[in-house]
Amino acid sequence: MAQRLTLQHFFALSVLLVLMLVASTAQAVSALIPAPPQIAARAYLVMDADTGHVIAADREDERFPPASLTKMMTSYVVEYEIAKGNIALEDMVLVSEKAWRTGGSRMFIQEGTQVSVDDLLHGVIIQSGNDASVALAEHIAGSERAFADLMNQHARLLGMENTHFENATGLPAEDHYSTAIDLAKLGKALINEFPQHYALYSQKYFTYNNIRQPNRNKLLWRDDSVDGIKTGHTDEAGYCLVASAERDDMRLISVVMGSSSEEVRAQESQKLLSYGFRYYRTHALYEAGQVLRDEKVWAGSRDQIRLGVAENLAVTVPRGQTDQLEASIELDKVIKAPVASGDVLGQVQITLQGERVASVPLVALEAIPEGGLFKRIWHAILLFFIGLIG
């Protein structure tokens, strides 16, 4: 009997060891992430549009001429002005001689005619019309020079630290430059801030003045998940593309600057998007306003306050590693009333295998006014003695 038990124990232990080895091997395999693909471009980047996490990049902070990627900011300013009610899609724009004469890619508007803001926006985004860009710039700011100043102000607000615009078109100009990371930030803003206009960027054709022109983004025909954003080309800038795609509730933005041809920029952008989707995923953690913790409040009209995050919190992690995410809360030592809704009272830290992947403010989800005089005095005494003990 003793021998049979020993064999049974040995067999059970062997099975347990095998299962542990299989589980450990599966976990190791799930964590394997290959190096990013080699990209034939001066600079490139692929980023999670929800979290802002950069999955792969090279020379993303270096300044290069952006060519017609400039028109992303032109359309951003137009959409901003529409959202603020300063202009409307139905407004008619008088085409100036300067707009009509602007060279390069064109929408073919005619001097002295009136064209709607809606048509001009289509012309900028789909046809990459330099003439449409100048017409909108003049309509909004009075001159293209003044409009470029607006563009630069918006760039600063969006955190585009290495970008400067001299015109609304992207035609070559001294001191006109941007970076891959800055253009990704701009693409993220276009998608998230003005979703009502974003469908324009996936439109394949636009016809104006009986001239039908295709969108120059070849990925719109090759990949159903791709829905934008903008191409660019000059001899100085090379062939550029900012693309975006959405698959399985994950949206990525890729940037390729300075490739050698239209075909190459499309292929290299596809490589970046495929790599990001295959090996990474966006993991939603908390929603804005979700209660993460109830905490003691001193000297308040109530003794507990609800704490959470002010904005949706998601992180980008390698596929198969979401179960290794850990969250911790760092809280101010003492919370004393009055507390206003939105006051920052701590931090939420998210780590993956010991490395921090996100840190966001922990905020009050409600206001707590001061309590009565007696309560304030009593709590002050208690805090005094707690401090002595501490």
Image (tube, rainbow, N blue to C red):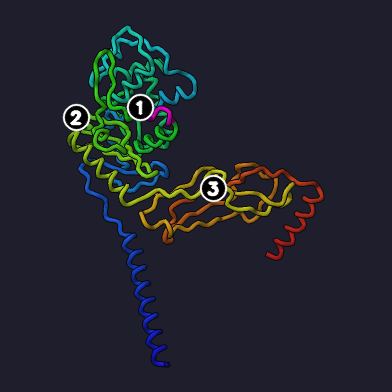
Question: Residue 165 lies in magenta, yes or no?
Answer: no
Q: Which residue carries the number 3 mark?
A: 361
Magenta span: 194-200
Question: Dot 1, how many residues are within 10 Å of its Cα: few (below 14), some (14-19), or many (20+)?
Answer: some
Q: Secondary structure at mark 3?
A: strand
Query: Picture coordinates of residue 152 (x, y %)?
Result: 39, 29
Left or right: 41, with 316 as reference point: left
The amino acid beneath tag 1 is: Leu
Q: Is residue 347 above or below residue 247?
A: below
Q: Which residue carries the number 1 mark?
A: 200
**Viewer-proximal residue among 202 and 344:** 202
Residue at the image point whose x is 70% and y is 61% from the top: 387
Q: Which residue carries the number 2 mark?
A: 235
The answer to which of marks 2 and 3 sits earlier in the sequence is 2
The amino acid beneath tag 3 is: Pro
Residue at the image point whose x is 51% and y is 48% from the top: 286
